Amino acid sequence: MQSMLMIDTFLVSPLGEISLAAMGIASTIVAFIMGIQMALANGSQLVLSRAVGSGVKASLARGYWSGMAINFGVASLFLILLQFFDHQLIEALTDDTSLYGEINDYLSVSQYLVIFTAVTQVSIALFNALGRTKVPFKGYLIEMPINALLSYLFIYGFAGFEGHGVKGAALGSVIAIMIRTAYLFACMHYSEEIEVRLKDHISGIKKSIKNHFLEIFPVAANVTILSIGATVYQLLYSQLNINAYVAITLVFPWIRSGTQFITAWAHSSAISISQAIGSNKMDDLVENVDKSIDIAVYISIITAVLFGILSLFIADLYPNLDPVTYAALATIAPLYIFLPIVRGYNTVHGHVLRALGKTTDVFKINFTGQWVISIPLCAAIIFVFDGSIFWAFAIQPFEEIVKVLPFRHLARKSLKEFNSEKAQKLMYD
């Protein structure tokens, strides 16, 4: 999912700092909405995984359509808000009028990504819960090259067709995700294993939607608060000089993409735990959680090494930028190299705890670490102390360090107390 914005950033970079800054602000809005949609789908994934563990196909079908109704409804709401309040939102995000036109160009097309993201994320949750993870993986492999090719052609033009610049990047992304959506639906239609026709499960769907929403809302609220926090960070960084902001805009998609490997492993762990809860087979639960945490740490270290390699070649990936921008990139390199190690440890703990029904406690830890401590500190560094890009960006790894001990303590305590009675309370369908 992160590849869409990363490809757009990579292809737009030759257009210069103004285009990059404009797309950075516009893509922050889109990434925020997509983060909420992914959070909703992650909550649905826990429900669907328990249904798979229980072996009740009707529960799986109702869970799928309940998740789809909720996610599509939220996407429609965001799309309506963007249609009517896009100019007000852009003016609230930046006072640099030179960016308004290109921000609006990118956002006018990329806003339609939210509809297709809603459909694809819930469908992916279904395939993941069933253990058919290769299906969505192949969907991304189809989408990425199409996105890259179309975006390039729409940005720069071809065979007499005039390119659309930043807007072309959004056009390529929308068409590519439409193709992936069609692929996922085709896989569902021709699969003998999937029986989710709505008309066969319409009875009780209203109650299922209600219960489904009550469970996944805390998951969505938790990830939403983190997404809003990431957006606030980006807006705070936009108050730095344009070279510093462009440097952060360039590395953000890489950070999101790199840490997505860790998040994906954490999701997988949560799926396995939820399937075990659904089947009431939890004898080796603690051992499996410990293994999941260990592997998450290994993946985090590998990601940090890859970020280190990225820092050595980032000037080759983004040529013809201002020398001050390259200096800013070098300044924050140690920070984004270290970030995935501590973030990965917290991420896997958070997903394990959500699978155990501790979403509210995870929310409290994230809210305190981000909103009570880190964001106010970042704002003080930028606005009060006029700090450099290094100290402003350092707040992100600092936030993760603050949350390490609370996450570890809560995970150990929750695993020790978890039993069949608590597992049964999570099964409502």
Image (tube, rainbow, N blue to C red):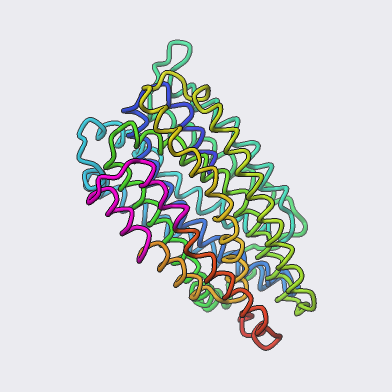
Q: Residue at x 74, y 58 (%)?
A: 131
Q: Against 49, is 258 above or below?
A: above
Judged from this view, the residue extending furthest toward the top is: 160
Name the side, left or right, on which 109 lies relative to 135: left
Q: Residue at x 51, y 49 (%)?
A: 117
- Could one spot residue 429 in this view of the protein? no
Q: Against 328, is 49 above or below?
A: below
Q: Position of residue 204 (x, y in %)?
A: 57, 78
The quadrant in which the N terminus is found is top right
Q: Residue at x 20, y 34 (%)?
A: 97
Q: Against 161, is 43 above or below?
A: below
Our reading of the magenta stretch's main secondary structure is: helix
Q: Against 239, is 401 above or below?
A: below
Q: Residue at x 66, y 56 (%)?
A: 296
Q: Observer-nearest residue: 128 or 96? A: 96
- Could one spot residue 77 in this view of the protein? yes
- Say whether residue 394 is magenta: yes
Q: Observer-nearest residue: 362 or 178? A: 362
- Say whether residue 256 is magenta: no
Q: Which residues are magenta?
A: 372-398
